[in-house]
Amino acid sequence: MRWKTLLLLLLYYNAQATVSHGWSRAVLFPAAHRPKRSSSVPLNPVLQTSLEEVELLYEFLLAELEIGPDLRISIKDEELASLRKASDFRTVCNDVIPKRIPDIRRLSASLSGRPGVLKKEDFERTVLTLAYAAYRTALSQGYQKDIWAQSLVSLFQALRHDLMRSSRPAAPP
């Protein structure tokens, strides 16, 4: 339950504090900017644009999620799954966030060398990747558990570092 509280605090803080700072050097989540021909999915979907949507995202995460053998994530609660925002949630979870260790490590490396504060959508996608890594860590055993735990820790450190940067007062011009 503690990780859920931490996740909620991170999402609330991000919704209030993160401000986009200009043009970034590289795209952290390239899949969000790649449209699929067979899909009506919006380009670069964002889940949290208001406090109500942050709370809804938290409900999605608290609801029982199911990760299939093909790593597709779905919400088991039919009422929540039928909401319009649930479609965006599934899109971000299934088509945008990385789910393989090499991709998560690449994201962590990009985050560690990144100047400035993350954009809101990059922060929320990193938090969702962190939640996914936590789930995979819990399911893994032996050496695989250690690898997933390392990825989980590096994502957490990147998010913590971003939160620390965003909480500093802005330097006068």
Image: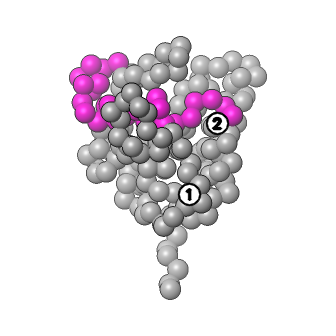
Q: Is 73 rendered above or below residue 57?
A: above
- Closer to viewer: mark 1 or mark 2: 2
Q: Can residue 60 be seen in this view?
A: no
- At horizontal 67% and vertical 31% (from top left) the residue drawn is 101
Front residue (pair 79, 88): 88
- For label 2, the SS is helix
Which residue in the protein does label 1 denote? 162
Quadrant hosting residue 149: top right
- The vertical placement of 167 against 1, above or below, is below
- Would you say residue 68 is visible in this rendering? yes
Q: Residues within 10 Å of mark 1 (few under 14, many from 20)?
A: many
Q: Residue furthest right?
A: 143
- Residue 23: x and y in percent read 51, 64
Relative to 103, 37 lies left or right: left
Please report whichever mark, 1 or 2, sits nearer to the chain's N-terminal start.
2
Magenta includes 121? Answer: no
Extreme residue toward the top, this view:
69
On whether residue 96 falls in the magenta region, the answer is: yes
| Alpha carbon distance from label 1 to label 2 | 20 Å
Q: Which residue appears at 67% of the width and 42% of the height?
A: 106
Q: How crowded is mark 2: few (under 14 residues within 10 Å), some or many (20 or more)?
A: few
Q: Mark 2 points at which residue?
A: 103
Query: Is 169 situated left or right of 83 in this image?
Result: right
Which residue is rendered at x = 64% and y = 36% of the image? 103
x then y, percent, for residue 36: 43, 33
Q: Residue type at mark 1: give it.
A: Asp
Q: In this view, does 164 lie to the left or right of 6?
A: right
Majority secondary structure of magenta residues? helix
Start and end of the magenta stretch?
76-102
Q: Which amino acid does label 2 sit on?
A: Asp
**What's the residue at 62%, 52% (across, down)?**
111
